């Protein structure tokens, strides 16, 4: 079976990594990895380098985002649609595997749909009311034939969208596989790698992405509120760059300026890489921002998380998450609660047990892709609560 996996950024590559290894180790799969989007951007740290460092063969396709507005995003989608249509015409996989909700997936999945290549979608059915990702994720669900949801709640959402119950599977989140299987850095190694003293026990880990359904001109002001709150604490904050979304450059400008003004309080890195990022989550005192990793992976580290705004609105949140609005005052109240010794974060992560990659690979191996035309002729399956749990 010829499978193409597409990664658009540092975030989804880290999640796809255990599945890529599983497919490469398992007989019967001819696996091709393609990198696009933020992986090819100098401003994002050219994170395709992390793939090379992992020793995985990867093919770059398309162009990175150039600019900081919605028009720039539209131009990137158009250019990459042309690039992926050519790529899939030259290298026709039996199946395309994609994860999540990045706008780059429109280019990838539209090209695959037109060229009659079946799609398997990971992490569908989720909700992020503050981001354009919501629309992208659900549109990819309707283009995809096979669905791998992280928890039953999200599988039910996919079923409510009319997808075939036989093709909807609950497998857990791949990020938990990484947490359980990837060796992490000791405190000294992590401190040397990041330039941040993690032995202090007062390090905050921050990632703040644009809230893409807000006016992107607001992005800089929003992150200023976050930083203003952090300046009133005794935390040292390690910050990773925002995604390559409209408003991302405005956020980065504020972050760079703040780190220059307060080098004893803040440090900005373009990207930590998966091993260092998980190590930082393990050793940080608190996490702050609006990243999906704060929702999905953090409970495995018993890490308090201050989740700001509605970018992650609608996601199922474990008890270690504290939601707040994007004002300095609200963030300070949430931080005080998160840092309180009475705040309980010890819990089982509801997003998985670390075996998602094995489950996905086993299901993929069982698929009959000999007649892609029949797979692509999707019918709307009506679903009700009396139908029981998804398979």
Image (cartoon, grey):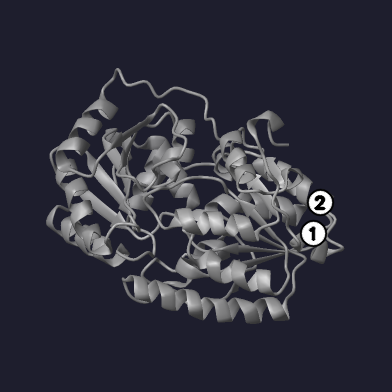
Q: Is residue 176 visible?
A: yes
Foreground residue among 84 and 298: 84
Foreground residue among 160 and 54: 160
Residue 23 is situated, as x and y percent measured from the top left of the image, at 73, 54
Which mark, by number, is residue 365? Answer: 2
Q: Please tell me which residue is depicted at 53% across the width and 77% down the height of the picture.
A: 80
Residue 101 is situated, as x and y percent measured from the top left of the image, at 51, 56
Which mark, by number, is residue 291? Answer: none
Foreground residue among 229 and 315: 315
Which mark, by number, is residue 29? Answer: 1
Mark 2 and mark 1: Cα distance apart in space: 8 Å
Say few, some or many: other residues with alpha carbon within 10 Å of mark 2 (under 14 / 14 to 19 / 20 or more). Answer: some
The numbered mark, 2 or 1, whose residue comes first in the sequence reads 1
Q: Please tell me which residue is depicted at 37% across the width and 64% down the height of the picture.
A: 245
Say few, some or many: other residues with alpha carbon within 10 Å of mark 1 (under 14 / 14 to 19 / 20 or more). Answer: some
* Position of the C terminus by quadrant: top right
Quadrant position of residue 369: bottom right
Quadrant position of residue 86: bottom right
Residue at the top extreme of this rendering: 342
- The relative height of residue 306 versus residue 92 in the rendered view (above or below) is above
Indicate the secondary structure of the residue bearing disc 1: loop
- The relative height of residue 209 versus residue 62 in the rendered view (above or below) is above
Indicate the secondary structure of the residue bearing disc 2: helix
Callout 2 touching callout 1 (CB < 8 Å): yes
Q: Which is more foreground, mark 2 or mark 1?
A: 2
Residue 388 is situated, as x and y percent measured from the top left of the image, at 69, 30
Q: Please tell me which residue is depicted at 48% across the width and 74% down the height of the picture.
A: 77
Q: Is residue 182 visible?
A: no
Residue 260 is situated, as x and y percent measured from the top left of the image, at 16, 59
Judge from the rendering whether residue 220 lies leftward or rightward of residue 15; answer left or right.
Answer: left
Foreground residue among 278 and 306: 306
């Amino acid at each position: 079976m010829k499978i193409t996996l597409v990664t658009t950024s540092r975030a989804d590559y880290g999640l796809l990594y255990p599945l890529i290894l599983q497919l490469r180790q398992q007989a019967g799969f001819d696996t091709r990895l393609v990198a696009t989007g933020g992986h090819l951007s100098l401003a994002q740290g050219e994170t395709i380098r992390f793939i090379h460092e992992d020793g995985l063969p990867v093919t770059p396709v398309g162009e990175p985002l150039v600019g900081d507005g919605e028009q720039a995003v539209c131009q990137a989608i158009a250019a990459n649609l042309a690039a992926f249509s050519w790529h899939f015409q030259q290298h026709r996989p039996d199946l395309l595997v994609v994860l999540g909700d990045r706008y780059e997936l429109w280019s990838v999945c539209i090209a695959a749909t037109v060229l009659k290549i079946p799609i398997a979608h990971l992490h569908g059915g989720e909700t992020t009311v503050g981001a354009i990702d919501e629309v992208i994720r659900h549109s990819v669900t309707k283009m995809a034939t096979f669905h791998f949801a992280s928890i039953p709640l999200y599988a039910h959402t996919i079923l409510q969208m009319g997808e075939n119950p036989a093709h909807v599977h609950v497998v857990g989140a791949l990020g938990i596989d990484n947490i359980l299987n990837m060796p992490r850095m000791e405190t000294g190694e992590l401190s040397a790698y990041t330039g941040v003293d993690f032995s202090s026990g007062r390090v905050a880990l921050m990632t703040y992405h644009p809230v893409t359904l807000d006016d992107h001109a607001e992005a800089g002001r929003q992150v200023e509120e976050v930083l203003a709150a952090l300046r009133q604490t005794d935390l040292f904050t390690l910050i990773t760059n925002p995604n390559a979304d409209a408003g991302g450059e405005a956020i980065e400008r504020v972050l760079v300026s703040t780190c220059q003004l307060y080098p004893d309080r803040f440090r900005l890195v373009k990207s930590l890489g998966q091993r260092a990022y998980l190590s930082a989550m393990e050793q940080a005192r608190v996490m702050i921002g609006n990243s999906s990793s704060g929702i999905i992976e953090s409970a495995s580290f018993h890490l308090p998380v201050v989740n700001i705004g509605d970018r992650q609105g609608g996601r199922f949140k474990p008890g270690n998450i504290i939601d707040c609005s994007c004002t300095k005052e609200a963030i300070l109240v949430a931080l005080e609660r998160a840092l309180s010794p009475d705040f309980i974060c010890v819990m089982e992560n509801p997003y998985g047990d670390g075996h998602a990659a094995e489950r996905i690979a086993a299901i993929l191996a069982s698929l009959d892709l000999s007649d892609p035309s029949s797979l692509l002729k999707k019918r709307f399956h009506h679903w009700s609560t009396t139908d029981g749990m998804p398979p």
